[in-house]
Amino acid sequence: MELQKASLRKIGEYIIRRCEKEDLHHVASINWTSLPEHYSSYFFESSLNELPEAFLVVEKDRTVVGYTMCRIEYGLSVFHKFRIARKGHIISLAMLEQHRRKGLGKNLVEEALQALKDRGCSEIFLEVRVSNLSAIELYKKLDFKIISRIRWYYRDGEDANMMGRLL
Ligand SMILES: CC(C)(COP(=O)(O)OP(=O)(O)OC[C@H]1O[C@@H](n2cnc3c(N)ncnc32)[C@H](O)[C@@H]1OP(=O)(O)O)[C@@H](O)C(=O)NCCC(=O)NCCS
């Protein structure tokens, strides 16, 4: 019998667990249907190889219905001027539409934040479209603040809010 994959968190019928290589085509498909920013399969795979602890999926009935993908960067701190920091970066987050507003996105990000903290990150940041009010609300609920506005960040010319918080 196939062993149950280790879950990090259970929310009703859903589980949050680490992404595995065989999940990546589901992740790519959720990405395609949910966001205008798409990535190559090479990018998904190398993100998983680099930081499997913070590449997480939500699963229901053995089907992947959401994901988040992160990486770690070194550079100037977003919060402390002139200081170098080890920063977590949320690259992508999405839930299939029919599974939204169940608290899953929030739980997913909370698990990713813990994983990044465990990997020594002292802060976290991300970019989000200024029009993406649902995601901005979610991040605010997790104590992220808007740090700056990045003009023309997206290909279609939309601005991004850079949001972040200390871990
Ligand atoms: C953003 C997204 C991941 C949220 O996932 P979710 O599982 O629906 O979010 P949650 O149910 O955990 O919501 C947590 C909180 O975020 C806020 N929120 C989420 N969706 C919202 C919406 N449509 N309108 C207003 N607030 C919203 C609320 O404060 C919510 O808490 P509440 O339900 O108690 O009011 C999901 O809408 C999505 O996949 N969107 C398309 C992809 C995307 O925009 N990704 C983010 C890119 S930066």
Image: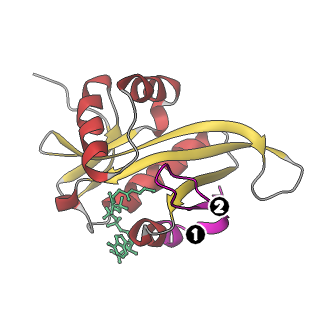
Q: Position of residue 54 (x, y in %)?
A: 48, 39
Q: Is residue 125 visible?
A: yes
Q: Quadrant of the N terminus?
A: top left
Name the amino acid type tagged 1.
Asp
Front residue of 141 and 14: 141
Q: Secondary structure at mark 1?
A: loop
Indicate whether residue 115 is drawn in magenta. Answer: no
Q: Earlier in the sequence, mark 2 or mark 1?
A: 1
The residue at 43%/72% (across/down) is 133
Place residue 38 in its image quadrant: top left
Q: The C terminus appears in which quarter of the rendering?
A: bottom right
Confirm or reject: label 2 Cβ below 8 Å from ligand 1: no
For image coordinates 43% across by 67% down, the residue present is 132
* Disc number for residue 98: none
Q: Which residues are magenta?
A: 139-167
The residue positioned farthest toward the right in the image shown = 82
**The stretch drawn in magenta includes residue 146:** yes
Camera-side residue of 152 and 92: 152
Label drawn at residue 165: 2
Instruction: Tell me: 57 left or right of 92.
Output: left
Q: Is residue 58 visible?
A: no
Residue 18: x and y in percent read 36, 36
Q: Does any atom of ligand 1 lie closer than 8 Å to the CB of label 1?
A: no
| Pointer 1 residue | 143
**At which x and y percent is residue 104?**
31, 59
| Residue shown at 23% from the left, 36% from the top | 26
Give the crowd class for mark 1: few <14, some 14-19, many >=20 residues within 10 Å: few
Q: At label 2, which amino acid type do we have?
A: Arg
On the rendered structure, is 162 left or right of 69? right
